[in-house]
Image (tube, grey):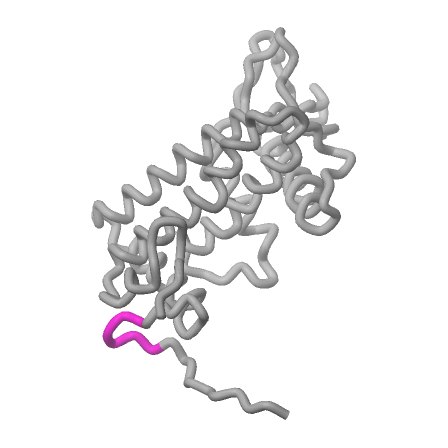
Amino acid sequence: MGWNLSPRFSSSKVESGKIEDFIDIYEDRISGWLLSPARSLLKIKDAGIAVTCLLVSYFEGFWQYRTGGDSRGKSDQFFRAAVSDVLPEITIPPGFNPTFDIKTVQANYLALVYADARCGLLHDGLIRKGILIGRAPSYLERAPMSISVHRDTGAVSFVLLDPEKLFEEIEKHHKRYCASLREGKDPVLRENFLRMWILRNTGGPSGAPAPPGADSGTKPVTPKGT
């Protein structure tokens, strides 16, 4: 009996054991389970929190596949690294002329987004005090994340998340990552993806077999009733 592993693919998709099929499923899971619902919610008034909750779940998981490492005990590091990969630049408004190191702001805002957006939404079901959801004021250019920062110290007072712009950047990033995996020009990128795929899927109800020669470290067990 088959079952769906993603919106478009059933369990038969993994029978080949080929990394190309695993990439197809991963891409479809993110696109169909996270991004497509987020796109639909963007059309609904006051759905910004729901959209953001879906979007922030992208970061840590992506970085696990990107690096081939488990984020257990290192969620903050993985999350912050992924946000920096999706949004690598901080744009300084004309005339701001800060006196601080821009790296200080980046470290401060990433810590705030992790604690008050990611942890707030996933642990509390709500954003925390350092996060606002919505569009930037008309006198500012719209951005996925707008940062309120002290001119002299670089301290971040709050971060404004724009769900629509954040969605656009994550969608583009996801497409680029999957395209890079398929191109195969970076063998380490593919090796890391495959390592995480095996760790997260082999032996589970997804029915994903390990590729030939791979050892998942698991043995079949038949549960018995009490």
**Does residue 220 belong to the magenta stretch?**
no
Asked if residue 179 lies left or right of residue 92, the reply is left
Q: Residue at x 48, y 88 (%)?
A: 222
Quarter of the image where the C terminus is located: bottom right
106 or 40: nearer the eye?
A: 40
223 over 122 or under it: above or below = below
5 over 104 or under it: above or below = below
Asked if residue 174 lies left or right of residue 93, the reply is left
Asked if residue 177 lies left or right of residue 184, the reply is right
Q: Find residue 111 and report its image quarter.
A: top right
Q: Residue at x 25, y 49 (%)?
A: 186
Count the marks: how many? Answer: 0
Magenta region: which residues? 210-215
Quarter of the image where the N terminus is located: bottom left
Q: Residue at x 60, y 11 (%)?
A: 140
85 or 136: nearer the eye?
A: 136
189 over 18 or under it: above or below = above
Q: Position of residue 214 (x, y in %)?
A: 30, 74
Q: Position of residue 52 (x, y in %)?
A: 60, 36
Q: Residue furthest right?
A: 129
216 or 78: nearer the eye?
A: 216
Q: Find residue 175 and report its image quarter.
A: top left
3 over 28 or under it: above or below = below
Q: Residue at x 55, y 91 (%)?
A: 224
Q: Magenta stretch mostly in which secondary structure? A: loop
Q: Position of residue 185 (x, y in %)?
A: 21, 47
Q: Position of residue 215 (x, y in %)?
A: 34, 78
